[in-house]
Amino acid sequence: MTSLDYQELRLMRARTPDQPPGGNLEKAADVEDLMVPSKAADEIARAQQSLQKNKPDAALDHLKKAAVIYPKYSKTYNNMGLIYRELGRMQEAETAFLKAIEINPRNATAQRNLGCVYLVSNRPERAIGPLGEAGRLDHADAAAGELYGFGDSISLSLITTRRSDSGCK
């Protein structure tokens, strides 16, 4: 079970039931994934099924249940943030991504997603920190790497001019 990224949220609606509930098959499970109790993993799987049926509110309900069962799994909050962002509920998305980062500051995907929320909310100055951290944590993260690849510091002008190319919707 791995974290969803924004494109994965759209693709998971077409995923077959035998695929894991979190995302990319090629990514190995990390320690955080291995700690998730089966009841929480079941709720995450139900959330995925709800998204496949285009029922984001039901998916959020399942993710909230998963968070109650196991509140130390940052990817649950990241996934909630993705759904909130897709629904245009940016304040709730920001809160969910911040919670994911509070639980696991090394979650590069949540860092990138938080930066994207700031970009689409027209707060590019706030995006610098999370996008830079995402790039430092995971140079393989293509969306953050696109911005981060120009050096160790991300300039506000670079983020502002490349906002539409950054993978943020």
Image: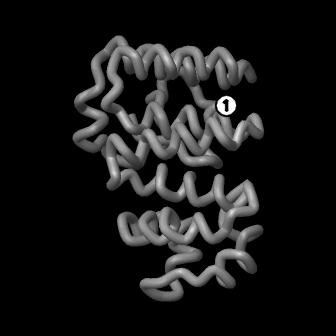
* Location of residue 93 in the rendering, given as x and y in whole percent from the top left corner: 61, 40
Alpha-carbon neighbours of circle 1 within 10 Å: few (<14), some, or many (≥20)? few
Which residue is under mark 1?
14
Residue at x 56%, y 52% (from the top left corner): 113
Which element carries disc 1, helix, strand or loop? helix
| On screen, residue 108 above or below 14 | below
Q: Quadrant of residue 155?
A: bottom right
> Which residue shows up at 50% across the image and 19% down it?
64
Q: Quadrant of residue 119?
A: bottom right
**Quadrant of the frame with the C terminus:** bottom right
- Report the amino acid beneath label 1: Ala
Q: Is residue 155 visible?
A: yes
Please state the horizontal and vertical placement of residue 131, each as a whole percent of the image: 52, 66
Q: Residue at x 60, y 22 (%)?
A: 60
- Observer-nearest residue: 148 or 157? 157
Residue 48, by quadrant, is top right
Report the number of numbered marks: 1
The spot of residue 6 in percent (x, y) is 62, 47
